[in-house]
């Protein structure tokens, strides 16, 4: 419960999974997606973040189906996905399997034909001519007016609706930093009176959002550095500088969400394979062992290798789920080793000296229960005769092989090869 300065116990070792209902199955429905729940539960997924499930606006719609983030009615479900009862059944089935459900919430803007434009047009910002206005160049939506007290109350009431009527466990809040922080603080207090929640802010720079309202935000900077390392535009020094900045900008108990892909990255900036190429697996593993909570996006375990269209139907191919074992193993490693958990539940990152600091990024996270060391060759060249400032007997968590490190020990790493080691 963030309001008391802590998080829900179930979040400490959790892995979050973003669900794109529209593109997940050929049917694109709640019921069709629900057949995947046992597989996701078996992988070890804890939190399901569902992209917006509301009806999509038709006025000024982009593409044939429009953006999920152009909400027409905050208290209804998109009929293309199914009925409200179908949604409740999905939430209940997830709960029966021990998973939590978060709903994507768009509080900054709404569709041009949102129901409030008829009932309460004063809920929206207007220009000098009294016309609705779009934020930036987002021409399919209009901005909400947070100077309007009634609008704030109505938005909080709509947030309460999904908790009381469907039993969801929290929210991922779109462009949370563009909404006044005091609104989120007020909303969290009222929502927590209904049930304990987990809240994710789509934001990175406003640490105040994590003070009371949100449990976690986005680690965008490290995501961009990972992409930049592959392009040789960033170095491992940039990576070290990032973690120093992170430790100074956020409190130890603030959760940060790590990812190599999500709906925005996939659709607009390219698949992880386009951006990371041969380094994809290494950086994916990195998100599971660095401080923070790892995110997986729909199809990541299947090796989704296309940019999903955002405004039209474009189904994920589930013919093979070739990375399921990889991610299942990474999830298992995270859950079974408390030093890798989120926030102050886990252990801080301590850098390890190596003989190739320009190629190899190595660190250890240890507490009273367990020590996990991670060694990554973040380059497209082999690293031979590598010395690591590591001692003792260790087990390779990916291969189960035993490894012994002494002062004279030297190892070799292939391009983009990595080790996740547990002290014996």
Image: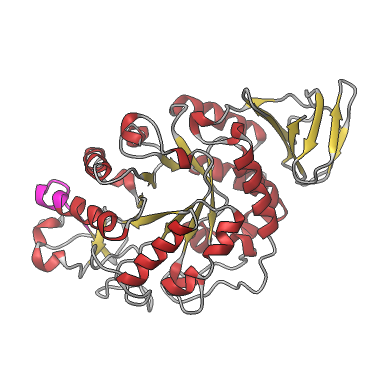
- Total number of numbered labels? 0
In this view, 134 is above or below 218 = below
Q: Is 380 situated left or right of 78 in this image?
A: right
Q: Which residues are magenta?
A: 143-153
Q: Could you tell whether 161 is left or right of 264 in the image?
A: left
Looking at this view, is 178 or 194 the one in front?
A: 194
Residue occupying image coordinates x 23% and y 44%: 187
The picture quadrant where one finds residue 203 is top left
Q: Position of residue 211 (x, y in %)?
A: 33, 31
Q: Is residue 384 in sight in this rendering?
A: no
Residue occupying image coordinates x 35% and y 36%: 1
In-image side of 167 versus 161 (left or right): right
Is 328 rendered above or below residue 27? above
Q: Residue at image x 73%, y 33%? A: 422
Q: Is residue 224 left or right of residue 356?
A: left
* Residue 151 among magenta residues: yes
Instruction: State whether residue 334 is above or below residue 5.
Output: below
Residue 304 percent coordinates (x, y): 61, 65
Q: Nearer the viewer, residue 190 or 352?
A: 190
Residue for point 39% across, 39% down: 215
Residue 169, x across and y down, in percent? 36, 51
Image quarter of residue 225: top right
Instruction: Give the colour scheme shown.
Output: secondary structure
- Name, please, the residue furthest toward the front: 96
Mark yes or no: residue 347 visible. Answer: yes
Picture quarter with the C terminus: top right
Foreground residue among 422 and 363: 422
Residue 256 painted magenta: no
């Amino acid at each position: 419960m963030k309001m008391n300065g802590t998080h829900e116990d179930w979040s400490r070792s959790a892995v979050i999974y973003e669900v794109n209902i529209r593109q997940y199955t050929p049917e694109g429905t709640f019921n069709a997606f629900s057949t995947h729940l046992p597989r996701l539960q078996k992988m070890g997924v804890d939190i399901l973040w569902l992209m917006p499930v509301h009806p999509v606006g038709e006025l000024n719609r982009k593409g044939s189906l429009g953006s999920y983030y152009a909400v027409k009615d905050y208290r209804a479900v998109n009929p293309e996905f199914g009925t409200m009862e179908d949604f409740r059944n999905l939430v209940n089935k997830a709960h029966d399997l021990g998973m939590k459900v978060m709903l994507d919430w768009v509080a900054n803007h709404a569709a041009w034909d949102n129901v409030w434009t008829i009932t309460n047009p004063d809920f929206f910002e207007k220009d000098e001519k009294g016309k609705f206005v779009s934020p930036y160049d987002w021409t399919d939506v209009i901005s909400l007016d947070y100077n309007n007290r009634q609008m704030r109350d109505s938005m909080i009431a709509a947030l309460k609706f999904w908790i009381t009527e469907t039993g969801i466990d929290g929210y991922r809040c779109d462009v949370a930093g563009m909404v006044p922080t005091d609104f989120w603080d007020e909303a969290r207090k009222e929502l927590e009176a209904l049930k304990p929640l987990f809240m994710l802010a789509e934001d990175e720079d406003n640490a105040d959002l994590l003070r009371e309202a949100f449990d976690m935000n986005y680690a965008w900077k490290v995501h961009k550095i990972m992409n930049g390392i592959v392009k040789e535009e960033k170095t491992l020094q940039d990576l070290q500088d990032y973690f120093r900045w992170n430790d100074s900008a956020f409190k130890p108990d603030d959760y940060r969400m790590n990812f190599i892909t999500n709906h925005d990255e996939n659709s607009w900036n390219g698949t992880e394979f386009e951006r990371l190429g041969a380094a994809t697996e290494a950086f994916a593993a990195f998100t599971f062992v660095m401080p923070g909570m790892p995110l997986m996006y729909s199809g990541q375990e299947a090796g989704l290798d296309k940019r999903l269209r955002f405004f039209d139907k474009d189904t994920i191919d589930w013919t093979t789920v070739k990375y399921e074992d990889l991610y299942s193993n990474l999830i298992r490693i995270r859950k079974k080793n408390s030093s890798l958990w989120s926030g102050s539940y886990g252990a801080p990152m301590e850098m390890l000296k190596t003989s190739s600091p320009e190629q190899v990024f190595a660190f250890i996270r240890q507490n009273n229960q367990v020590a996990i060391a991670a060694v990554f060759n973040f380059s497209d060249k082999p690293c031979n005769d590598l010395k690591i400032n590591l001692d003792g007997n260790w087990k390779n968590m990916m291969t189960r092989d035993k490894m012994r490190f002494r002062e004279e020990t030297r190892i070799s790493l292939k391009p983009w090869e990595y080790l996740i080691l547990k002290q014996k």
